[in-house]
Amino acid sequence: MHQAERGLFDLRQGRVLCVAAPDTVLLLAAVEGLRDETLARLRDLGGGAVRLVVTHHRARSMGLVDGRPGSLGPEQVNGRVVALSLGLGPGHHLKEILRLSSANGKHSGPLDLREAGVLESTGLTFARLGRLLPAVVGASVDPSAPELESLIEDGTILRLTARQIEEFSTTHRVEVVHVSDAPVPLEGAEDARFILFREGNGLFEHVAVLIGERERWPDPVPVRVHSACLTGDLFGSLRCDCGEQLRGSLRVFKRNGGGVLLYLAHEGRSIGLANKLRAYTMQEEGLDTVDADCALGFGADERRYDAAVDILRHLGVSRIQLLTNNPEKYRAMEEGGIEVLDRQPLHGELNAHNLPYVSAKALRAGHWMEEMLSRRLRNG
């Protein structure tokens, strides 16, 4: 196992990582899954000084980038991250850290703000790669401290370099590997075949569902690039139109003589199920889907479509009819060398639960949703 792969596993398990650069060493732990003993170890090894690192999106949602006294100016954090100094009393550490990292609302108490250092930013990048809440706690340590050396030697703490993490985290494009495939007859599409692809770094798996016989596919080939949505696809959630789009694409394939469904591991616009549920809670408090994601520290849409392009190349598909309402998917296909000769919209029914979501996609993200928004609400 690559050292960085083990490091990501340890971070997801709530363990401490030692991240080293030529002139400094930092101990890091993810806020998600943080335990009292982990925080105590950071404080002990770091001499009591622990800092919280959050993204600039999170800093803005906390009101820490608004020009008021004690805040940072927009030019200081735009596109970067800030570190927040923690001065929490005994017994309130974990609760306060989680509140600072994920709760909706402005922060009013005093905080020692500064731009995050390179190692802090690297740790935050690592947490986001693992689809954890984008927040880490860190403590600077003496690399020659006997206790630290002992913990690294016996394997309790893994030591990584910033370069190892960066090389693992920042690839220019995703490469996928064909893992396995099998026929999977579906209702209304008995001639379906599922092909599993795994990203080269082993983190995520995607499925290509081939409907119909390749020889009889139309030209251009109908293609749906679908982001996985457990709540909508499986349970029929009324909050979104994902499940209806998924089933609608299968109907298009059947009507046209076949096609390709790319089912991508992009739960919650690639923030993961845990953070998607956190965002749902914030939406109940009045935020729209874009602002809720940003309040948690993410961008408005964390998805990339390199894997989709790579899978289509693997399948030998280069001319497509794209079934989408999302201009970013259209753009990604074109930029990846996949010729989009036609686009077909996919719309579900509008209801009181998904109206805010659909409106935000149209007004905030520029999705082509005018037709759906012009319809009457179901049961409305």
Image (tube, rainbow, N blue to C red):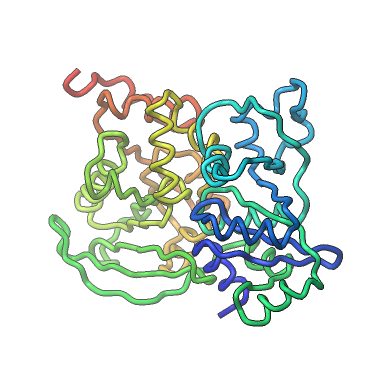
In the figure, is residue 315 to the left or right of 347? right
Could you tell me residue 5's position as x and y percent?
Answer: 57, 72
Could you tell me residue 98's position as x and y percent?
Answer: 53, 43
Name which residue lies at 34% across and 48% down. Answer: 229
Q: Quadrant of the N terminus?
A: bottom right
Q: Quadrant of residue 115?
A: top right
Q: Nearer the viewer, residue 192 or 20?
A: 20
Could you tell me residue 276's position as x and y percent?
Answer: 41, 43
| Above/below status of 161 relative to 127 | below
| Above/below status of 152 relative to 266 | below
Name which residue lies at 62% across and 36% down. Answer: 57
Q: Is residue 298 visible?
A: no
Could you tell me residue 348's position as x and y percent?
Answer: 26, 34
Q: Quadrant of the C terminus?
A: top left
| Above/below status of 19 relative to 69 | below
Name which residue lies at 31% across and 20% down. Answer: 374
Q: Quadrant of residue 221?
A: bottom left
Q: Nearer the viewer, residue 367 or 133?
A: 133
In the figure, is residue 135 to the left or right of 276? right
Q: Nearer the viewer, residue 197 or 274?
A: 274
Q: Is residue 187 visible?
A: yes
In the figure, is residue 222 to the left or right of 349? right
Number of numbered tags placed on the structure image: 0
